[in-house]
Image (cartoon, rainbow, N blue to C red):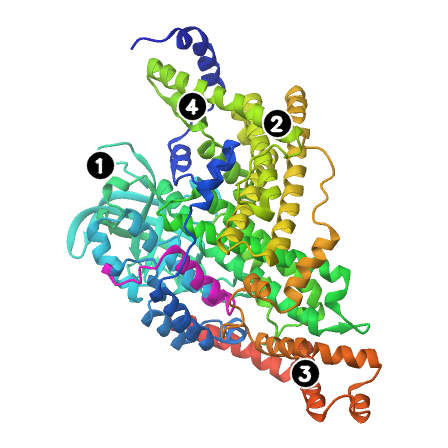
Amino acid sequence: MALSFRAKWITRPIHNWAQSVLPQLSDTESEALTAGEIWWESDLFSGNPDWSKLHDVKAPKLTEEEQAFLDGPCEELCNMIDDWSINHETGDLAPEVWDFMRDKKFFGMIIEKKYGGLGFSAYAHSEVVRYIATRSVAAAVTVMVPNSLGPGELLHMFGTDTQKDYWLPGLADGRELPAFGLTSDQAGSDASAMIDEGIIEKGEWQGEEVLGIRLNWAKRYITLSPVCSVLGLAFKLRDPDGHLGGEEDIGITCALVPTDLPGVETGRRHIPSTTMFMNGPTTGEDVFIPLENIIGGEEYAGRGWMMLMSALAAGRGISLPSMGAAAIALSAHTTGAYARIREQFGLPIGKFGGVQTRMGRLAADAYVIESARRLTCAGLDEGRSLSVISAIMKAHATFRMREALNDAMDVHSGKAVVDGPSNYLLPLYRAVPIGITVEGANIVTRSLIIFGQGSIRAHPHLLDEMLALQEPDKEKSLVAFDKSFWAHVGHTTKTVGRSILRSWSGSRLSPAPDDAAAAAPIYRELSRWSASYALIADLAFLTMGGDLKRKEMISTRMGDILSEMYLLSAALKRWRDDGKPNEDVPLLRFAAARAFAAVRTAMDEVLANFPSRFAAGLGRVLTVPGGAARGPADKLTEQCADLIYTPSGTRDRITGRIDAGCARSGIAVLNEAYEKVTTLAPLMKKLREAEKSPDEALSAGLISQADRDRIAESEALTAQVIAVDDFTPEELSRFYEGFDKNRIERVAAQ
């Protein structure tokens, strides 16, 4: 093909230089980069987000069938669960709970109806997990795992028709209980380090000699492993005898292994942070399966990493973000109520500034993470595989879950420290490390995936340039690179102009939707930082090249900026979907102030650590990131704190379905006490102004006997809320003995 003058004389030297500095991508890296797809994050990365694209996303909504499931079986399940007993007495869900979950197809929510599943949307799946998590983490995890990364999801995405027909009906109705084995002693976040191995050879299967795989593995941290009937297994596949006619080392492969096969060991348990869902190790020694057990069939041998990344792109955006949203909402709900009824120094503690600091942050975080959960589910329900957004959601929903529970624990103080059936915060607090760690440790997700994968996938031209440089045909490589490189140059030129205009005008010349109303300043500021972010990303690519992926601290900060922009844009979308209620504007402003302070700080730190000081100085001139990053003002914090302190429609929107029968032990009486205290507030104010106790007011005729009785009822409920659990030495002794006995008996029975 004929080369243009530009390609031949201008682009070629740049192409040669780029090939020399860009490291060659392995097949695994290429598959990971191309797994999933981009969506709204690409607009934020472009430097010029199209707000109409965000607004046009259809708000998620439950069908009548899904709503009925939430109102019926979900609530019934929650009422069956004794979370204290699960975690401290029996070490397991009750047998009738397991039976109920199977009967109502909780394990088959994502399986299509034609295979006997419920065929629920991503939003319904998320709502179910969120709802159950307000009652019991152990039960929520038990439900979420079969519907997330595992055999069901992988079969849905990659399985052959024969595999789907055979396995999915049993998975849907609970006859088959799945687990997925990925993590091993040597391979945690680095799956490529696994030594679990499968060798292609001939062996006996159901009385016949067939070509299959001889497996040996040792996995740990595998949820449902102690009780699963079928194990999805990731391993390195080798073909030393050339049975398949290709290379010896085929690569990471995913297959289905029935756990009743000779050589499979399950049953032993881990205790994950004293949260007693089924989790444990599994080993296999010389286990033989046929080639047909490879998920997707023989053509998917060696493509396991791509499959796992694609499955994670969906499941990781639902399960743990739903649990995080539940924990944050529950923290906001209970802390607002507790701060209203608990008094110190003659005042409800919710009137003290230190407490309001925590409450304001709780209110805004609950609003933001719920908003992002809804937006992410909307994208998934459009059929998208959102790899970068799912990583953002998993990391930041669980990070903010940790922050929210710390805030709630601070406000509740000793009430939340003392364990017992009435402690509604400690079970979630103990589960925080689980959420932070599983489905991709947050440290790795934040430092390597969000920006590392997001920068390549979400950038308008970078992936095209990289693929062009990987092309073995030099002429084709140059032609493709010439096209994408000069498109990139044009993009960067526009980005420089936008960044200067928007940054130096203090966002006044940034675009915002015509009907943005009270949110217009937030839209403008977000548009400004989007342009600055795109520019700094291009400067980083230009000056660091392939070394950028080793600059993990810079990558972490860039990932944090992208995450903050996504979360804030989700809050804007929710506010719009809800009809732009004026009452919720303080939440938006708090979220924006916090997000922009974090973005400004991260941008400043990125430039402070640029290896090229000239590029850093140029970046500061073009983006103006400096200045005080103050965060929300005190008055705004007080307003947001009051939104969960005082009964209102906004409080209900912030906390969601916490008090509808699916609440932890202790929350029901908290809700009742809160209702009594807030209803009696005008009457108690009257007594304070008269400087009379209730009995004195009754004697003086200021209140009626009915009023005095209502006050006494409120005082009794408040005392019940403030009380903590205690145990006799004999009760504690029986508890530990009973737990050991029950655990041993259950494991032996399995």
Which secondary structure, mark 3? helix
Residue range in magenta is 114-139
- Pinpoint residue 82: horizontal percent, then vertical percent: 50, 76
| Amino acid tagged 3 | Ser
- Pinpoint residue 621: horizontal percent, then vertical percent: 67, 24
Which secondary structure, mark 4? helix
Q: Between disc 3 and disc 4, whose residue precedes?
A: 4
Q: Which residue is mark 1?
A: 244
| Amino acid tagged 1 | Leu
Q: Residues within 10 Å of mark 4 (few under 14, many from 20)?
A: many
| Amino acid tagged 4 | Glu
Q: Residue at x 33, y 47 (%)?
A: 254
Using the image, tell me which numbered label, if any, was put on residue 67: none
Distance CA(mark 1)–CA(mark 2): 60 Å
Q: Which residue is mark 2?
A: 501
Distance CA(mark 4)–CA(mark 1): 34 Å
Q: Which residue is mark 3?
A: 714
In front: label 2 or label 3: 2
